Image: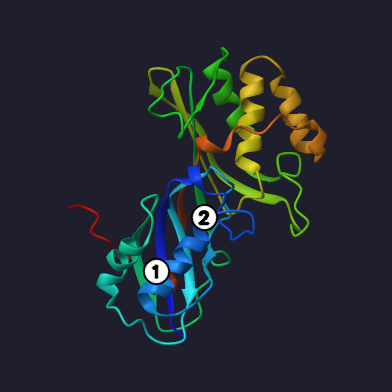
Amino acid sequence: MPTVVLKVAYDGTEFVGMQRQPNGRTVEQVISEAIEKILGERSSVVAAGRTDAGVHARGMVVHSRLQCAPRVPQQRIANALNSALPEDVRILGVHVRDDDQFHARYDAIRRVYSYTINCCQDPLNRRYEWQVRFPFDPEVLKECSRLFIGTHDFTTFSKQNASQHSYICSVEQCEWQSLGKGRYRLEIAANRFVYGMVRALVGAMVDCARGKRSLQELADALDARDRRLASPLAPPHGLVFEAVEYPPHLGVVFHNACLCA
C-alpha cells in the first residue's frame, strides 16, 4: 500500500484546528480534498501533531495511505496539490513510499514549536504573535524556561484529554531569545508534547515574568501535577509548529516544491 508523506505549512487563523471536526474548516479536511482531486483517491490524513484553532505551522508532516501508486510523478505532486489547495495551506515537500511502514505521528522522535510575544502593538503581525499590553521582565522569562528542560510530568501544564495516557515528556530545549524591538521568541523541542502544553507553559512563564507568581511557585506547580495550579493559556496565534524529525532508518527525504513564480 503506497504512502504519500507531505511536509506542510499553513496559516491557522481561519481553521478550527488540524484534525477533522464537524464544526468547521480544518487543515486535514482541505488536504484530503486536494488529494482526492489530484490523486483520485479518497484517503484520510494523519498528522505529526494536532494543532488547535489559530495555531500555525511551518513544518508539519502528514501521511496518507493510497490504494494505488500515485498517478502523478513525485516531483510534480507538491505543485499539483498546491494548485488545489487554498492559499493558507502549502505543501513544501513530498516523499512517496511503496509501503505502509511510516506513521507521521507515532514514528516522530522530536518535535519543535516556537512561540512569539511582542511588547508593541504591530497590526501587520497581530495574527502571528501575542502582543502583550503589560510590562514583563524578559530575564525572568529566560529563568523560567530552564525549569522545564529534562523529563517531567506535564499534567499541570496541559489541557484535559481523555485519550491521553501519559503526560511525561522529555524536553531537550526550552529557550527564549530576543528578536529586537520588544519581540521575544521561545523555541522548545521535545520527544512529544501533550495537549495544550506549549501554550500553558508560555502563559505560566509570562505570569511569572510580570510578577504574578514566583519561580518557586512555577517549579512547585510542575511537581504537583495539578491543573488548578496552571496559569491561563497563552493565545493560540503566537504558536507555530516548526519541525518534526524521524529516525534516519526510515529514509524520509522530501522532494521540495517550487513555490516561486
The three-letter code of the residue at mark 2 reads: Arg
Measured from the top left, where is residue 228 in percent x and y? 82, 34
Question: Distance from label 1 to label 2 (Cα)?
Answer: 14 Å
- The residue positioned 49% from the left and 42% from the top of the image is 13
**Residue at the spot 45% in from the left edge and 29% down from the top edge:** 126
Q: Is residue 173 above or below residue 104?
A: above
Circle 2 residue = 110
Give SS at disc 1. Answer: loop
Q: Amino acid at mark 1?
A: Val
- 23 is higher (above) or lower (below) than 223: below
Image coordinates for residue 177, horizontal then vertical, percent? 44, 28
- Where on the picture, by quarter, is residue 83? bottom left
Q: Quarter of the image holding residue 132?
A: top right
- The number of numbered discs placed on residues in the rendered structure image is 2
Q: Position of residue 96 (x, y in %)?
A: 37, 76
Q: Which mark is residue 252?
A: 1
